[in-house]
Each structure stands twice: as C-alpha cells, then as structure tokens.
Amino acid sequence: MTAFIIHNMAPLMFAALIVLLLLGYPVAFALAANGLIFGWIGIELGLFNPNFLQALPERVYGTMNNEVLLAVPFFTFMGLILERSGMAEDLLDTIGQLFGPVRGGLAFAVVFVGALLAATTGVVAASVISMGLISLPIMLRYGYDRRVATGVIAASGTLAQIIPPSLVLIVMADQLGRSVGDMYEGAFIPGLILSGLYAGYIALVAIFSPKSAPGLPPEAIGFQEPNGSRGAWHLLVLVVFSALTGYYVMSQTEVRSGADFVVLTMSVSVIVAFLSAAFNRLLGAKRLVLTIVIAAALVAGYVTLQNGGHADLALLSEALIAGTLYALVAGLLERFTGRRLISRLAEQVTFVMVPPLGLIFLVLGTIFIGLATPTEGGAMGAAGAVILALARKRLSFSLLRQATESTAKLSAFVIFILIGARVFSLTFYGVDGHKWVEELLLALPGGEVGFLVFVNILIFFLAFFLDYFELAFIIIPLLAPVADRLGIDLIWFGVMLAVNMQTSFMHPPFGFALFFLRSVAPRKSYIDRITGKRTAPITTGQIYWGAVPFVIIQLVMVALIVLFPQMVTHYKHGAVQMNQQQIEEQLRELAPAPDTNMQPPPLNFQ
C-alpha cells in the first residue's frame, strides 16, 4: 500500500482535490488543505522534503507583492463604475435605434454593445446583467425568439473574457510568465473576430427564420429627420470619412499592423467624427465664419508644428483639421441647399460612442504603444471611469462604496485562490508531480497536435465544473512547461485556452453567464408597460438551449486560432529584434582602449 501511494502521489492529489471540490468546499481552502495534508503524508513517507515548507511564507509574500495582479482591482473598479454610470443604457438605446429596423437589429446591437462593454469594463457579470435588464424586455416585446434573445445576451457578455482588458488574460499572463501587454495585443484580433462570428450567426437566423429575430416597427424608431428619413446614410458617410482619415494619419507613422494599429486608427477616427458632430451641433450653418476661423487656426498650427519638427503633434492636428473641415462642408451644404450632411442619428451615435472608445484608447492604446504598463493603464482607466460618471452626474458616495466593496471582494477572492494554488503547487512539485504530468502529456500520440487536441478537450470538459480562475490557477501552470518544451508560443497558447475557457461561462448547467441572466430574466408572466400585453416568462431550459449555438461558435473560434495562428502572433511585429553581432560591435566601441605604455605598479611586501 505504501509503495502504491508513493508511486501515485501526484494522481492521488488530483483525485483528492476533485473530491473536496465536489463536496462543496471553497476552492482556495480546498487547494491549501490538499497541499498541506499531502505534504504531511509525503514527509511521513520520506517522499517530501520538509524544508520545502520553509519557502511557503516567501511564496505567499511573493504572490501579494506581484505588481501585475494590481491590474485586477483597477480594471474591476473601472468596470463596476461604468456599469452604474448609465453608459450601457445609452449605448443599447442608441445602437438599438441604429440597427432596429433591420431584421435581427436588436441582436446586432447587443453584440456590438457587448464588444464595447468588454473593451471598457472587462467584467462578464456587469455586461450580462446590464444587457439583460435593458435589452431583454425590448426583445421580448417585439417578438424575438426567447432562445435567440437569451443566447446572444449571455454570449455577448462573455466577450469581456477574451477582449482586453480582460481579467482572465491578466491571470493567464501571470501564470504563463509572459507580458500582459503581449497577451492583450494577441487577444484583441481574435476577440473582434469572435464578435463577428456572433453577428454572422444572428444574420443567418434573421435570413432563415425571420420570425425569430424581427425588426422594430416604424413607430418604435426615433431620431428621424424633418423629412421623415432616419439619416442613416449620413452616419455611414461620416464613419467612412473618419475611418479613411484615421488610416491615412496612422499610415504616416511607424505602426503598420496588429492590434495597436487598429486601436490607434480607431482613436484617430473617433477624434475626427467627434469634432465633426460637435462643431456641426454647436456652430452649424449659422456660424460658418467661426468654423472657418477655427479651421484656419488649425491649419496654421499644423504648418508651425511641421516646420518645428514636431511630427507627432502635426499628425494629431491633421485629424483636428479633417474634423473641422467636414463640419464646415456640412454647414455650407445646409446653408445653401437646406440638406443636412450630419443627421441627428449620426450626432447621437457619435456622442454616445466617444466615452467608451475614449476609454479604450486610454487603457489599451497607452498599453499597446508602450506608454503605460497594464497596471498603469488600469489605474488610468479607473480614473477615467470616475470622471465619466462625474460628467454624467451619476457619481455618488453610495456608488463609490458599492464599487469599492465589490472590488475588494473580487480581489480577495483572486488572491486567496492564488495563495491556495501556491500551497498546492509547492507540495505537487515537491513530490515530482510536474514530472508525472510532463511525461504523461509528452507521451501522447501526435506530438504537438496531439497535445493541443488533448488539452482543448480537457479544458472544455473541466470548464463544466470549474470557473476560469480555478482553471487558470490549477491547470495552466501544469500545461505551460509542456507547451514550452514542445516549442509552442505561450502567448498564442494562452489566448487559445482563454477562448476555450470562455465556454465555462456558457456551459449548461453551471455557466455563470447563464446564472447571471437567469437572475434578471422574468420568471413569471407580466404586463408589458408599453404594449399592455401579457408577456410569458423565460424558462431555464430556454436559456440553456439558447447558449448551445454560441458554445459551438466559441469552439469554432478555437479551431480558427489553431489553423491561423497569425491572428495572435502578430503581437511579435513590434518586438525589438536583437542582433548579436551589432551588440558585440557596440560593446567593443564602448570598451576603453588598452594603454601599452602603462607599467605595472611596484609590489610592496612590507
């Protein structure tokens, strides 16, 4: 019996951990208790060196002294403040009006807003609950299929796990020993593609089952022009002009591709669109002279900056000039023809989009261009969220207290799990469990492909019972060394697993996003306050079945990342390439030349 325990200590530790978790013990304490109990057993059997336990306080202190994990409370606080600032309501209302007349328009709006909230809040619960409270009653009012409505809300909320600034990516980077900035940059494009796949599924539903995702009736559409048109083409023209201007400005910089190019181009485009809409609303056709004076002043400033060698500021002034000139053309057109180039809908969409997109640049843009670390970016994002709430007159002591308490709870939750994982891993490594895992995984048939297939299947099924923090702290440290030995890029490996772990929020019956949506979905029939009709409740089975197509889409995204790794590995394009020969030449130039006339000092033995 003793020989069996010694030989199978590592698998027994895993089995005991699973039993403790199934019995309902908290994960952090189950991990720590498991590590200490098997550490004592290992000492009694002579398998575990008791000196390892002396390193335990240092490991705990090292966990709490980890500066990277400081980003977790910053991003959590930012997301909670934004959730309560009313930004989600404005986004869903305006974008819903934009896409409303199209079949599936409300679902498209949910996907679009879900991606924006993911890139600003980074918190799944905030996104799912906000969209469930705001969008779900409207979708039910206008006849959306309950499975489609609940599925798209839950899936769009989980985008906060893969689109930066995701808390999962911070933890993943820490466990893999890689840069959070690289992890963010690598995950940005896959997050956008996954959003596109969700929208593509909604388009297919709208085409093949129009009754499941109808468009809004004409009486539900607002932001109409005096002639009765919606003015959607005005918005399209403004978006195209702003995007082309942003692309032109960024093409003159050293940034050429990747997530940083996308974020910075989007930021320049937002500046152009905002100035166009703001000048059009404030100045319009009645103050054309003032618009001309502003445009002339910006052109003069551009020339001065260009001649003074301030190329970066000159590029920014190009965006300012473009926005002012667009407003000037719009004012001239309205003055002499009576037609508007910037409609009310275009203005409203622009003004509503500026705060979240501004925060995206403040957080991701500064991280991608190297101006700030992820922790510093999180701090700026938290400050920006407070300023936005203050500007919207939603900031109060009660809001700050609730956000601070929730942030403290989540941060303590993460730290306690990490400390428990450190205790577990100390014993696990002490009994050579990591060698057992490496031998087991390296012996899989198929080499690298076989390893990736096994790991993805393992993570998918473990996600039925464990959430993403537990998977990241328990499983990832065991898989990373094997992936590194096989020559797999760990950033790519981490992004792939993050997309796979995203299914943990959508898995029936334990998906947290489904529980969040269940908490706000109607359990009983009610009278709709607009139509006056009785609306049937949403069953738990409808929520579960609605999640299934989106879980399949997430697995398709995992396959796409495996087949097209370039969508992640583009993060390397900005890395500094070290040339060993050039380094040696520079070191030789810096070294002092030897003095051949120098005499050695006399020796004195007295």
Image (cartoon, rainbow, N blue to C red):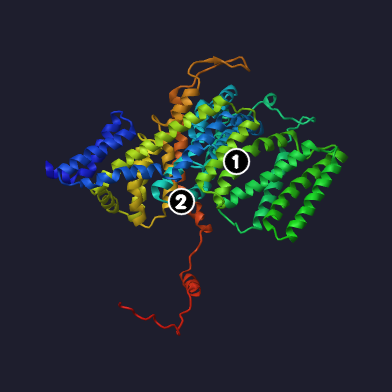
Q: Is residue 133 left or right of residue 606?
A: right
Mark 1 or mark 2, which has the lower sequence index? 2
Quick one: which residue is furthest to the right in this view? 336
What residue is shown at x 29% (from left), y 46% (from top)?
55
Camera-nearest residue between 103 and 444: 444
Identity, as a three-letter code, of the amino acid under mark 1 = Leu
Quick one: which residue is furthest to the bottom in this view? 597
Residue 193, visible in the rendered structure: no
Considering the numbered disc 1 on the image, is that residue within a helix, a strand or a loop? helix
Distance (Cα) linking label 1 and label 2: 21 Å
What residue is shown at x 31% (from left), y 33% (from top)?
29
Considering the numbered disc 2 on the image, is that residue within a helix, a strand or a loop? loop
Q: Where residue 200 sits in the image (x, y, percent)? A: 55, 40
Q: Where residue 141 sits in the image (x, y, percent)? A: 59, 22
What crowding class fits label 2: few (fewer than 14 Cα within 10 Å), some (14-19), or many (20 or more)?
some
Q: Which residue is mark 1?
A: 359
User: Splitting the image into 4 quarters, where does residue 410 fall?
Assistant: top left
Residue 128 drawn above or below residue 324: above
The dot on residue 179 is 2
